[in-house]
Image (spheres, rainbow, N blue to C red):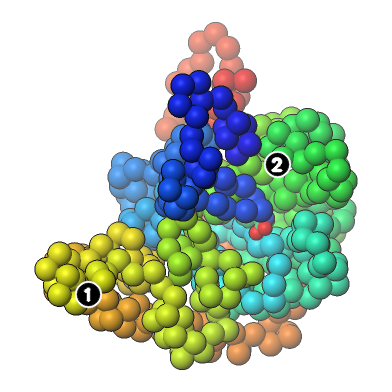
Amino acid sequence: MATDAAAPAAEAPPAPAAADQDINPWSVQGGVDENGEVVAIDYKAISKKWSTSLIDDALLERFERVTGHKPHRWLRRGLFFSHRDFDRILTRYEHGDPFFLYTGRGPSTGSLHLGHTIPLQFTKWLQDVFDVPLVFMLTDDEKALFKEGLAFEDTLQYAMENARDIIALGYDQKKTFIYSDLKYLSNHFLMNAWEFSRLVTFNQVRGAFGFDGSSNIGKIFFPSVQCVAGFATSYPEIWSDTPSNVRTKEIAKIDCLIPMGIDQDPYFRLLRDNSHRMRYPSPKPALIHSKFLTALQGAGGKMSSSNPNSAIFMTDSGKQIKNKINKHAFSGGRATLEEHRELGGNPDVDVSYIYLTYFEEDDAKLAKIYDSYKKGEMLTGELKKLAIEVLQANVEEFQERRKAVTDEVLASFMKPRRLQWGGNPNPKPKPVPEPKKDKEVKAGEKDLPERQKK
Ligand code: TRP
């Protein structure tokens, strides 16, 4: 971001073309090398810069032990690569303590592309594994505030279209509440948003999001809205059906896990820094971060709705998918057949191969493809064909399910209501706490190492 790019390079100033990668909630740019070439996004560098924890084998082993589920292929293959306090959520699950999932989508167009569906499909899987409530925020307010030329009516309509797509990904209606900010924000949610806004200064959001004196004031308030969606008190009706439900200390203690693309992390750092300062304090929501789905053109970009050739849309026909992959998918193959046979291809930069790593479940099959492409046995055309088949199947299946989303189904997901879920069927009893010596440790504090730093 600006601060890093501006850091003075005392001895050798970088060549004018070179630039650091720039990741923020509104744009994702890979770095540029001395030759002006865009380089792959360096996810380890983002994690380091923002002090997130990388997901390692030990965490995945613990996940499997605690949940009895094999980690999703996107965890095994590092597409979800980073987290904050995910281990604490596992502890909660282990003991049957309540928590919910929160994720969202900015409805900037009426149709999702494959890249959008990754965190959403993953969230659905988490919901199945943990058997917990999910709240799904559609930030139609955000998109109209940030995108010139989009009216609030437009983004609201996109939100409704997107909601149908989201439902088509297979969420369980009994456990899922989907809402449009423009329609739902009121009562406790709004009270939380205003209360939170009182805790955050303009200087803080300016630092986190790069606002300046000419930014509209909606943008400056909006982070408050996206943040407080991680408080259980924003949805009292989910947890109880007494009509007089209000924000309470008890509800505020329900924990939260937020799956997201890493670009959204700046919002939730703000949330985590302030959640204990609310009138009814909440734990710092736990976060799990994904990489971006590589654009068809290859490393350094992400699929983007504004560039139709960079993305596979969930409305694309089988034929369109085939053409896009054949024409636009960056290839790690060699210039000629002879060279390819002799020297082998480079699967690591090959977009068709990368897409297979997202959607091919079979680890052994994938390893075989990798080797044979690298050795030059498998040709680019063959690799593309495999990717096309997997993508076509995924998108077609989605389109079938989308047809089943009637107006009634949509309304049932978007109705504020009490949700029903099971949680951990066999929770482990909590260890009996050791007798306290000097100072009383507040309940739950042992789970919150960062809070102790404060
Ligand atoms: N701001 C996000 C976007 O533009 C939408 C969003 C809201 C979100 N809340 C979220 C994404 C929580 C991930 C997690 O897409």
Q: Amino acid at mark 1?
A: Thr
Q: Amino acid at mark 2?
A: Phe
Pointer 1: residues within 10 angstroms few (<14), some, or many (20+)?
A: few
Pointer 2: residues within 10 angstroms few (<14), some, or many (20+)?
A: some
The answer to whether 200 is drawn above or below residue 97 in the figure is above
In the rendered image, is residue 362 in sight? Answer: no
Residue occupying image coordinates x 57% and y 53%: 28
Give percent across and percent down for residue 449: 52, 27
Ligand 1's quadrant is: bottom right
| Circle on res. 336 | 1
Local secondary structure at mark 1: loop
Extreme-left residue of the structure = 342
Q: Which circle, 2 or 1, is nearer the viewer?
A: 1
Residue occupying image coordinates x 67% and y 44%: 267
The answer to whether 192 is drawn above or below residue 310 in the figure is above
Give percent across and percent down for residue 291: 47, 54
User: In the rendered image, which residue does mark 2 sit on?
Assistant: 209
Whether label 2 lies within 8 Å of ligand 1 gets the answer no
| Circle on res. 344 | none
Give percent across and percent down for residue 240: 73, 57
The answer to whether 258 is drawn above or below residue 430 in the figure is below
The quarter of the image holding the N terminus is top right
Q: How far apart, in angstroms, are the residues tagged by discs 2 and 1?
A: 46 Å
The quarter of the image holding the C terminus is top right
Local secondary structure at mark 2: helix
